[in-house]
């Protein structure tokens, strides 16, 4: 499914050593990328995630899309107000990790079940251990994410106590994304300056070591395309299975 030979990963390894982040173009074999893109359309239920009043919310994305305009505008105002006060996010997700451990991923999304199995096999983990110089990586968790017009993720560093995250990864599926649409993975210095942007590119695997300040810039409200990626973390220790708050 992946094409992660040492020669293809060499540039990413060099960038990771120098900057703690890097990218591998054409990470998936062409037929696998095509299958995954088609399988996105068959996802049975997307969840819209955000925070309100300091609390994480999982909302039915389809129901939210059908909400009366005035109510949705009020909701969006509250979400943006939360962003002004601190950490905030708004995007859609399909939780591969939780679905896998719940025993339903194979039935609901068989192509992504296959992908999740590969992400936790030597075919993927061994190249990641090598490129990150992290031989203790033992498993990957993952989710399918979809950013639509107005969606965003404010600055954070992915460092969570007890998660044992070595690095984060973003495998972009969407093709033809334009720079001025937003949705970039923006890395920041400790003083908040943006020091590098990874504009979404189809079939590109972005990797960065944890912790590292970053954000996903807002997708322009005029954009009809969706920024779809498989995102997750490479972790050490024993896979604990889904936990509250994952």
Image (cartoon, helix red, strand yellow):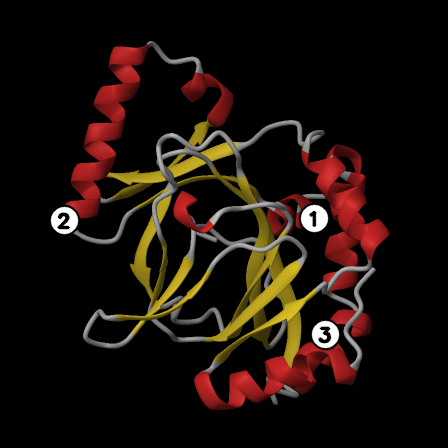
Q: Position of residue 235 (x, y in %)?
A: 57, 73
Q: Mark 2 points at which residue?
A: 85
Give the residue at x 55% y 71%: 207
Q: Mark 1 points at which residue?
A: 100
Figure check: 177 above or below 128: above
Q: Kindly identify which numbered label has been placed on residue 124.
A: none
Q: Where is residue 33 in the image (x, y as percent from the top left)?
A: 76, 50
Horizontally, residue 180 falls left or right of residue 11, namely: left
Figure check: 35 above or below 63: below
Q: How crowded is mark 2: few (under 14 residues within 10 Å), some or many (20 or more)?
A: few
Q: Residues within 10 Å of mark 3 (few under 14, many from 20)?
A: some
Provide the secondary structure element on which disc 1 rests. Answer: helix
Give the residue at x 63% y 72%: 238
Figure check: 159 above or below 61: below
- Mark 1–mark 2 Cα distance, whole angstroms, equals 35 Å
Residue 104 appears anywhere in the view: no
In front of the other: 42 or 140? 42
Give the residue at x 36% y 38%: 220
Asked if disc 1 and disc 3 are in contact, CB closer than 8 Å, the reply is: no
Figure check: 10 above or below 150: below
Dot 1 or dot 3, earlier in sequence: 1
Dot 2 or dot 3, earlier in sequence: 2
Q: Position of residue 91 (x, y in %)?
A: 43, 40
Q: Residues within 10 Å of mark 1 (few under 14, many from 20)?
A: many
């Amino acid at each position: 499914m992946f094409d992660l030979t040492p020669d293809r990963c060499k540039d990413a390894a060099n960038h990771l050593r120098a900057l703690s982040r890097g990218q591998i173009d054409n990470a998936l074999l062409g037929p696998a990328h095509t299958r995954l893109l088609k399988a996105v359309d068959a996802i049975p239920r997307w969840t819209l995630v955000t925070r309100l009043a300091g609390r994480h919310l999982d909302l039915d994305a389809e129901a939210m899309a059908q909400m009366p305009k005035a109510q949705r505008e009020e909701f969006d105002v509250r979400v943006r107000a939360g962003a002004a006060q601190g950490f905030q996010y708004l995007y859609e997700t399909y939780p591969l990790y939780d679905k896998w451990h719940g025993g339903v991923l194979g039935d609901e999304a068989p192509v992504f079940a296959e992908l999740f199995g590969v992400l936790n096999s030597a075919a993927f983990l061994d190249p990641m251990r090598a490129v990150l110089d992290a031989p203790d990586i033992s498993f990957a968790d993952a989710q399918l994410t979809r950013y639509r017009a107005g969606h965003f993720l404010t600055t954070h560093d992915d460092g969570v106590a007890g998660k044992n995250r070595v690095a984060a990864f973003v495998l972009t599926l969407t093709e033809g994304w334009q720079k001025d649409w937003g949705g970039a993975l923006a890395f920041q210095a400790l003083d908040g300056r943006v020091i590098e942007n990874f504009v979404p590119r189809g079939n590109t695997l972005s990797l960065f070591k944890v912790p590292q300040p970053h954000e996903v810039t807002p997708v322009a409200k005029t954009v009809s395309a969706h920024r779809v990626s498989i995102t997750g973390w490479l972790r050490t220790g024993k896979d604990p299975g889904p936990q509250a708050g994952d």
